[in-house]
Image: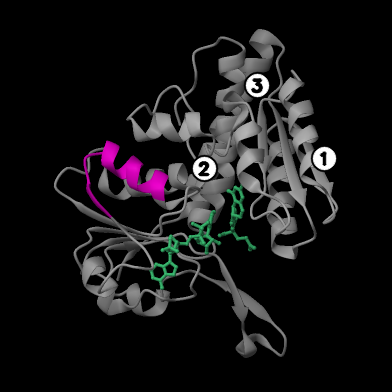
Amino acid sequence: MAQVINGKETAASVIAQVKSTTATLEAETGVTPGLAVILVGADPASQAYVGSKSKMAKECGFKSVQYSLPEATSQEELMALVADLNADPTIHGILVQLPLPKHLDSEPVIQAILPEKDVDGLHVVNAGKLATGDTETGLISCTPAGALILVRNVRGEDLSGLNAVVIGRSNLFGKPMAQLLLTRNATVTTAHSRTKDLAAVCRTADILVAAVGRPEMVKADWVKPGATVIDVGINRVAAPEKGEGKTKLVGDCDYASCEPVAGAITPVPGGVGPMTIAMLMANTVIAAYRKAGKPVPKF
Ligand SMILES: NC(=O)C1=CN([C@@H]2O[C@H](COP(=O)(O)OP(=O)(O)OC[C@H]3O[C@@H](n4cnc5c(N)ncnc54)[C@H](OP(=O)(O)O)[C@@H]3O)[C@@H](O)[C@H]2O)C=CC1
Ligand SMILES: Nc1nc(=O)c2c([nH]1)NC[C@@H]1CN(c3ccc(C(=O)N[C@@H](CCC(=O)O)C(=O)O)cc3)C=[N+]21
């Protein structure tokens, strides 16, 4: 029986700290953290995530603005909105929900966000700081930052001597996750679609992190007994057992089979997902403190 890692509970404690540091900043400086979330198009899953981000921002006492732009938005219009938000002193964080519709190029949009407002940690300045071992002065991608807190709760601050395997090498998750684990002295392997004998690579992992986007790909015999399993995948699949036309969320790990082998495991939902939203709020508070010239809270 694995320890079930409760992401909801840990996220709630991060949110409590966000609320109290927001109140302190306001009392001391009159500054309210401001978060702008931009969604282009009408993908229902993206709409739901963006909605919950904006709602949480309000709950934290932020100024929260959501831009829901039509599918037909042009690259120039999106770039112009980013430029406006960069210039807006009441906005400390800007997030462009990915993926963008196919006719838009995300990279110039992301790189146009001021690094100090890039609460997704995707700007080359923020990605480069993390890659060179600076975890103090930039902003770190929310999902890996949240996943690392869950790892820390199980394995402690120092991961010396432990093997970590991250499946996935995206800029949003896989790469920054591997770098964060390295900063904690884990021995890190990044696996991806070209990795040979993925199951055998995964079996070496004391900490196994899956961020692939393939429902229930990781099976029990990929998991080293006692391993800490962090399931980042969010996949909506058909759930005929719940009734016709019903769906459910599953991760990239086959939870039912992996759970008895693992030492600790995150559920989906209720694992990494809530941490992502909490760390987005934390990054916005950090950005607002920096702008106000105040010592930044640690999360
Ligand atoms: N919980 C949360 O808050 C968040 C969840 N997610 C979820 O995490 C998952 C991954 O997201 P993201 O990183 O953005 O996705 P990407 O699609 O950008 O990356 C997926 C990665 O998985 C690799 N991959 C694909 N197929 C295989 C395979 N058969 N074997 C091994 N590796 C494979 C790809 O390899 P290659 O590079 O070779 O193509 C790629 O590196 C998704 O399910 C997403 O919904 C994402 C962000 C936040
Ligand atoms: N620029 C950008 N930054 C992102 O961080 C980003 C993105 N684009 N695009 C999509 C992915 C996905 N993502 C999630 C956030 C929260 C949950 C979450 O809260 N999940 C809940 C369940 C939600 C539900 O029930 O639908 C849970 O796992 O418990 C999931 C997924 C952020 N992403």
In the image, the residue with mark 3 has its CB under 8 Å from the nearest atom of ligand 2: no
Query: Which secondary structure lies at badge 2?
Result: helix
Which residues, given as a range, are shown in magenta? Answer: 175-189
Where 170 sits versus 243, above or below?
above
**Mark before the other along the chain sequence, 3 or 1:** 3
The residue nearer to you, when weighing 69 against 203, is 69
Where 49 sits versus 254, above or below?
above
Read off the residue under disc 1: 77
User: Mark on residue 142?
Assistant: 2
Read off the residue under disc 3: 23
**Mark before the other along the chain sequence, 3 or 2:** 3
Identity, as a three-letter code, of the amino acid under mark 3: Ala
Q: Work out how far the residue at label 3 is from the one at label 1, CA to CA, in angstroms.
A: 35 Å
Q: Nearer the viewer, mark 3 or mark 2?
A: 2
Counting from the top left corner in percent of width and height, residue 35 is at 70, 33
Q: Quadrant of the N terminus?
A: bottom left
Instruction: Tell me if I can see residue 139 in this picture.
Output: no
Q: Nearer the viewer, mark 3 or mark 1?
A: 1
Q: Find residue 84 and report its image quarter.
A: top right
Counting from the top left corner in percent of width and height, residue 245 is at 72, 86
186 to the left or right of 149? left
In the image, the residue with mark 2 has its CB under 8 Å from the nearest atom of ligand 2: yes
- Asked if the residue at tag 2 contacts the one at tag 3, i.e. Cβ–Cβ closer than 8 Å, the answer is no
The residue nearer to you, when weighing 202 against 162, is 202
Q: Nearer the viewer, mark 2 or mark 1?
A: 1
Q: Work out how far the residue at label 2 is from the one at label 1, CA to CA, in angstroms.
A: 26 Å
Identity, as a three-letter code, of the amino acid under mark 1: Glu
146 to the left or right of 160? right
- Mark 2: few/some/many CA within 10 Å (<14, 14-19, 20+): many
Q: Find residue 229 and report its image quarter.
A: bottom left
